[in-house]
Amino acid sequence: MPDQSATDEAGERAAPRTGGAADAVAALVDAFAARRPLRAGAFIVTLYGDVVVPRGGSLWVGHVIEACARVGISETLVRTAASRLVAAGRLEGTRVGRLGYYGLTAAAHEEFAAAADRLYALPRDGSGPATFTLALQAGSAAGEPPDRASGFVPLAPGVALAAGHRPVPAGWAGLTAASDDLQGHDSLRAAVRQVWALDDLEAGYAAFIDRFSRLSDLLAAGDRLADGLTALSARLLLVHGFRALALRDPDLPPAALPQDWAGDRARRLFARLYLALSPAADAQVSSFTGLEGALEAVTPGVRARHARLGG
């Protein structure tokens, strides 16, 4: 059975529409707004990761409410979710007169920037060595084992494996091995499907492709969205859906992945659509304000993000 969180965040289906790009965005919004309960906190995290991280600073709460309202999240839900994010140490609030602003804490900014490195990138080309990290429990008094959130999966008591070079927790020993030639590709692919539950993840990626392909095709054919807020809403939903998948992707080397891996196709779709939506979406962002005044449409951080997506 596909992972439910992946289906909720990236794969929900909406009734088909027959219009152009604006209707395609409306279908995305309808599908998101139809979910109960709405994940206001998760969407605010998406908003800050996409809009604030590459620009720095903060957002006036009114603009947070405006962006969330376009996808069916009420002001009450926004304020409740923002308060919880403050309590969790991810946002910090500031008042200037009657106006309230929220910015990322230093720890959250670092966390969000690291997540952005995984989201805003094209598929790897398969060149270079394949690397894995083996974590071994160092003794009976070892600390907490590495978990899936850190990229590791348990293989046996005291043994865990991750793709790539990963730090291991205190009390554990790490062994990183790299190979230019992974032998037995078919056997390797079969093994990693089981270890990392790739069938569930691939189903999520396939649903993401199904959901966002129509809008991408319409924009590629020359259709346009009427206003910047619609473009920004579509881009936020795109990032929101892709983030739910990409951040739990083990980032396996290409030789270990199934042939015609849906994750690569989803990543290329994400890059195309993100770049297509960005001129209008970034222009809309320039109408948003923070403590330092109006946000810039394009910054060095925004340019770097676009370059990593092939723009």
Image (cartoon, rainbow, N blue to C red):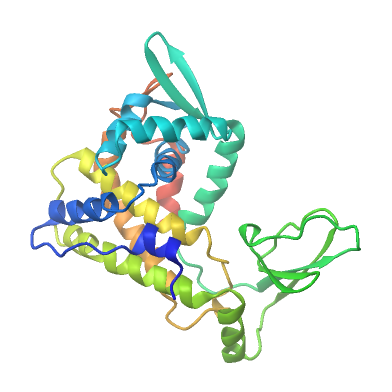
Front residue (pair 113, 100): 100
Whether residue 57 is visible: no
**Residue 265 drawn at (x, y percent):** 38, 71
Residue displayed at 42% across by 11% down? 96
**Residue 262 drawn at (x, y percent):** 41, 74
Residue displayed at 30% across by 57% down? 273
- Residue reaching furthest to the left: 19
- Residue 218 falls left or right of residue 110: left
Count the labels in the image.
0
Answer with the quarter of the image where residue 231 lies: top left
**Residue 205 drawn at (x, y percent):** 40, 69
Q: Is residue 267 above or below residue 302?
A: below
- Residue reaching furthest to the top: 97
- Residue 161 falls left or right of residue 22: right
Whether residue 271 is visible: yes
Residue displayed at 57% across by 48% down? 114
Answer with the quarter of the image where residue 63 lies: top left
Front residue (pair 135, 270): 135
Residue displayed at 43% across by 35% down? 81
Answer with the quarter of the image where residue 241 lies: bottom left
**Residue 66 drawn at (x, y percent):** 28, 32
Which quarter of the rendering shows the N terminus? Answer: bottom left
- Residue 41 falls left or right of residue 26: right
Front residue (pair 247, 52): 247
